[in-house]
Amino acid sequence: MLRFAVSSLRFACGSLRFAGWRRRGAKVPPPPALRRPPDLPDRSTGAQETFGHDLSDREDIVRELLRLSARVTRRMRRAGTVGRTIALTVRFTDFKTISRSRTLLDPTDVTQEVQATVARLYDELNLRGRALRLVGVRVEHLIAREGTDRQLVLGARERGWSEADRATDRVAERFGSSLVRRASLLSDGQG
């Protein structure tokens, strides 16, 4: 395999042709000014599920959104990040895809908050039993959890969903993720 300096290729091909060549997947490293430092957190994280059969029941879809929200927020807590923008993606049986997002006032990594937001976004689509092939949950605008403050609410509990998520994470790390899950994710006969 021949190797050329990036500047030599740009000079030989011209800057427009070089940019097009690079977009087509050639392995050319980005210039230092465009490289992302390795210590920065990802900008977004998400999960999606393509179903083996189409889903149209709201209860089944909301349960799947909870499972995906739990997966995404567990990944965020492990990385030490929180995010402000929650996005929902749905794909219909004709492969038409719709995405909706909502930006929260405070960044979060709490499963309950992410799931409540995507469930609201789903309800606002007014799909009325339309069959879905795929659903996805994404949290964007991630920042490091350290140094972020959370607005306290007068009369709110001292402890809540955030502590429950962290306790679940500790149990899952020690004994495996299949041991602990939310009761609403259990199927009939489990328990």
Image (cartoon, grey):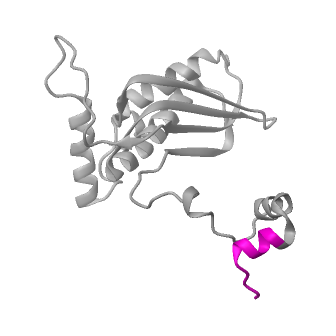
Is residue 182 visible in the rendered structure shown here? yes
- Does 156 sit above or below residue 144? above
Which residue: 52% across, 44% down? 46
Span colored in magenta = 1-11
- Residue that sits furthest to the front in the current view: 11
Can I make out residue 60 in this image?
A: no
Which of these two is toward me, 5 or 54?
A: 5
Q: Residue furthest bottom?
A: 1
Residue 116 to residue 42: above or below? above
At horizontal 16% and vertical 11% (from top left) the residue drawn is: 155
Question: Residue 48, percent across and down?
Answer: 58, 44
Which quarter of the rendering shows the N terminus? bottom right
Quadrant housing the C terminus: top left
Whether the magenta-drawn stretch holds residue 8 is answered as yes
Q: Residue 55 placed where, x, y %? A: 65, 33
* Residue at the image position 51 percent from the left and 37 percent from the top: 64
Query: Residue 11 in the image: x percent, y percent?
Result: 80, 70
Q: Examine the image and state in which quarter residue 67 appears.
A: top left
Q: Is residue 108 left or right of residue 135?
A: left
Residue 101, position as x, y percentages in the image: 56, 26
Residue 140 inside the magenta-drawn segment: no
